[in-house]
Image: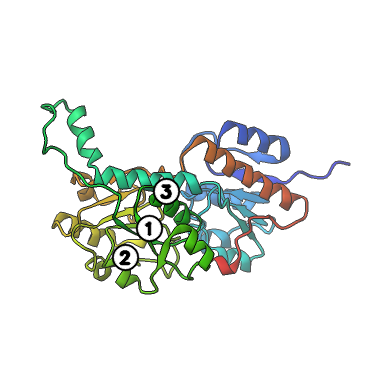
Amino acid sequence: MASKRVSVVVTRRLPEVVETRLKELFDVRLREDDTPMTRGELIDAVQSADVLVPTVTDQIDAGLIGQAGTQLKLIANFGAGFDHIDVATARSRGILVSNTPGVVTDDTADMVMALMLGVTRRIQEGLSVMQDGSWQGWAPTAFLGGRLGGRRLGILGMGRIGQAVAKRARAFGMQIHYHNRRQLRPETEQALEASYWESLDQMVARMDVISVNCPSTPSTYHLLNARRLKLLKPTAVIVNTSRGEVIDENALTRMLKAGELAGAGLDVYEHGHHGNPELRQMSNVVMLPHMGSATEEGRLEMGEKVIINVKTFADGHRPPDQVLPAML
């Protein structure tokens, strides 16, 4: 008799080729419309599935995990970030958690550079005058921005993405500085031509551009708080493609409004997915809808990692991308 196939519930629409492969391998329930599941639908999913495949739009908190059935043994996240999952509670219930690290590194780093250029070269303002038809023609002093070359870049979080940003920024002629929980190995620092700052306060006070590339954890919540933001030079620019909660968004908004910062490029937001409404009115702020990892190649590779994690689990082994306590 054939063994029972693992039951999998997917919370959002995934690329068609990924969904097709999931159907071939597992007893899978796919999402018919591309909207987040309601709380009730998530409860039903964790009470019926062996494996849940959520995304960043799903809050897999202690309350939800507490209602899971005993059959739920794996939460295979579609995405590298896992701050929306209460990993500690899942572990206490004997539920493994996996993610999809590494596959969006280059895509996100590319977007960091796009946002840097967008702010420093005033691309948003240029687009606006072209779209509304108000451009009067070239002028020597119109839309003057600044070069990236020669600027000091401070990278907050020097993991995979931070290092990929450093490589790109170095090619633009930027000086690379970073703050991280741990200093990189000397050979890695040398390859990146990067200078380590143990003191975040001292680093941010001296940088021209800050790129936020650290994960969202209790220790990084409001890491760039009102006090620390005040240390930045008024000519500085902030770029955030990581998690909105790392920056005190209200404090950032106040400083931008007061002209105490030169600009910001944001792909993530602290309060909901729209960001502070006042930010949308500022010409020196470039706002994107959390699209840093949005490439076809990246989404397919994320799906492949999910499939490998679930298949490895179904075969009786631990998923290769299991989230471990040391990662929290």
Q: Name the residue under label 3.
A: 168
Among the two numbered marks 2 and 1 on one chain, the one whose residue lies closer to the N terminus? 1
Find numbered disc 1 in the image and state the secondary structure of the residue it sits on.
Answer: strand
Q: Are marks 2 and 1 in contact (CB under 8 Å)?
A: yes
**Residue 257 appears in which quarter of the rendering?**
bottom left
**Which residue is more in the foreground, 104 or 54?**
104
Q: Where is residue 268 in the image (x, y as percent from the top left)?
A: 36, 51
Look at label 2 and name its amino acid.
Leu
Q: Name the residue under label 2.
A: 224
Among the two numbered marks 1 and 3 on one chain, the one whose residue lies closer to the N terminus? 3
Residue at the spot 61% in from the left edge and 32% down from the top edge: 17
Alpha carbon separation for disc pair 2 and 1: 9 Å
On-image quarter of the N terminus: top right
Alpha carbon separation for disc pair 2 and 3: 24 Å
Q: Is residue 307 above or below residue 158?
A: above
**Residue 121 appears in which quarter of the rendering?**
top left
Look at label 3 and name its amino acid.
Arg
Q: Name the residue under label 1.
A: 212
Q: Residue furthest right?
A: 1
